[in-house]
Image (spheres, rainbow, N blue to C red):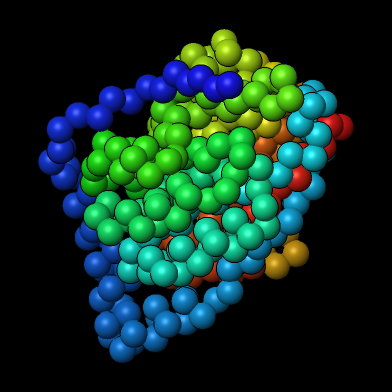
């Protein structure tokens, strides 16, 4: 049995606004032009960097006993576009699917700029075998072009796009509840959004922005999954928390607050072709009751 309550209506096509044009200009100046001057070597070097499939065991207090050992395939920040060709992204989805997740959780930034062309990737995600559901929340880059179009395309292909919604699945008579909130940049608005979905007492919360975590912890939500920071993309070799994600306290990996846990995925892709000591990743989480 399953049920869902999802927000975010799908309206008409929106015009590309100033944020899209600024991101396009930044991409042109910092990536495409430099790459052209280097005769394509910048992009080639970036694409040669391996993307790790990381197995992570997480002990989570209050994790439901009935879902002990649940495997969550966590994808984030693919940034489909110039630095992430669609074939490479689909291969990542297939690698994650081969690791047999119970749940697929994608925490946004599916695309870097234009949404067109992401349909085959959404198709791969939507057809992954994940018996307890395939979930997506949008990131800030997904909002640059046409978030409604991505949402509709994802839903048409079997993904549950949670934008202020809670989805409930049952296994052997036990409920498993997944909540997701849409992109927002401010802690205050994120807190409001978390409180809205928190009433349904979700076990798992998806939020592109890790700044949702303090509110999730106040409500005792056992586990929050996030992305967005890319782990700063550049970090000191032996101090992963010393990185360029200066605006985020929670920039990569695992964090605890009371009985709640946050896992921040450093992402599979990037909008800028540089990573040092922050290898790109896709993650398979195995959840244990602490
Ligand atoms: Fe991102």
- Quick one: 32 or 83, which is closer to the camera? 83
Q: Position of residue 60 (x, y in %)?
A: 79, 33
Residue 33 at least partly seen = yes
Q: How many marks?
A: 0
> Is 29 drawn above or below residue 44 in the view shown?
above
- Quick one: 172 or 175, which is closer to the camera? 172
31 lies left or right of 56: left
Find residue 10 and report its image quarter.
top left
Q: Quadrant of the C terminus?
A: top right
Find residue 95 and report its image quarter.
bottom right
At x 69% / y 27%, what residue is drawn? 171
Q: Position of residue 53 (x, y in %)?
A: 65, 62
22 lies left or right of 75: left
Q: Position of residue 141 (x, y in %)?
A: 35, 47
119 lies left or right of 233: left
- Quick one: 161 or 274, which is closer to the camera? 161
At x 58% / y 21%, what residue is drawn? 1
């Amino acid at each position: 049995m399953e049920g869902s309550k999802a927000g975010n209506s799908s309206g008409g096509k929106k015009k590309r606004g100033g944020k899209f044009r600024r991101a396009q200009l930044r991409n042109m100046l910092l990536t495409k032009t430099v790459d052209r001057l280097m005769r394509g070597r910048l992009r080639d070097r970036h694409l040669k960097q391996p993307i790790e499939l990381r197995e992570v065991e997480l002990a989570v207090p209050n994790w439901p006993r009935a879902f002990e050992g649940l495997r969550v395939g966590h994808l984030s920040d693919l940034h489909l576009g110039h630095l992430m060709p669609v074939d490479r992204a689909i291969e990542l989805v297939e690698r994650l699917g081969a690791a047999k997740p119970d749940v697929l959780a994608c925490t946004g930034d599916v695309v870097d700029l234009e949404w067109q062309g992401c349909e085959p990737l959404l198709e791969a995600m939507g057809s992954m075998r994940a018996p307890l559901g395939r979930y997506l929340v949008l990131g800030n880059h997904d909002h640059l072009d046409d978030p409604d179009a991505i949402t509709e395309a994802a839903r048409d292909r079997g993904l549950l796009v949670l934008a202020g919604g809670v989805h409930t699945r049952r296994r052997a008579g036990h409920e498993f509840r997944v909540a997701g909130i849409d992109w927002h940049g401010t802690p205050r608005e994120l807190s409001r959004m978390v409180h809205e979905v928190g009433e349904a007492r979700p076990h798992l919360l998806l939020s592109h922005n890790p700044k949702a975590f303090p509110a999730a912890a106040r409500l005792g939500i056992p586990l929050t999954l996030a992305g967005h920071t890319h782990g700063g993309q550049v970090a000191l070799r032996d101090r992963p928390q010393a990185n360029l994600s200066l605006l985020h306290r929670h920039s990569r990996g695992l964090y605890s607050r009371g009985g709640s846990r946050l896992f921040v995925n450093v992402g599979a892709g990037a909008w800028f072709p540089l990573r040092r000591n922050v290898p790109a990743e896709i993650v398979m989480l195995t959840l244990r009751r602490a």
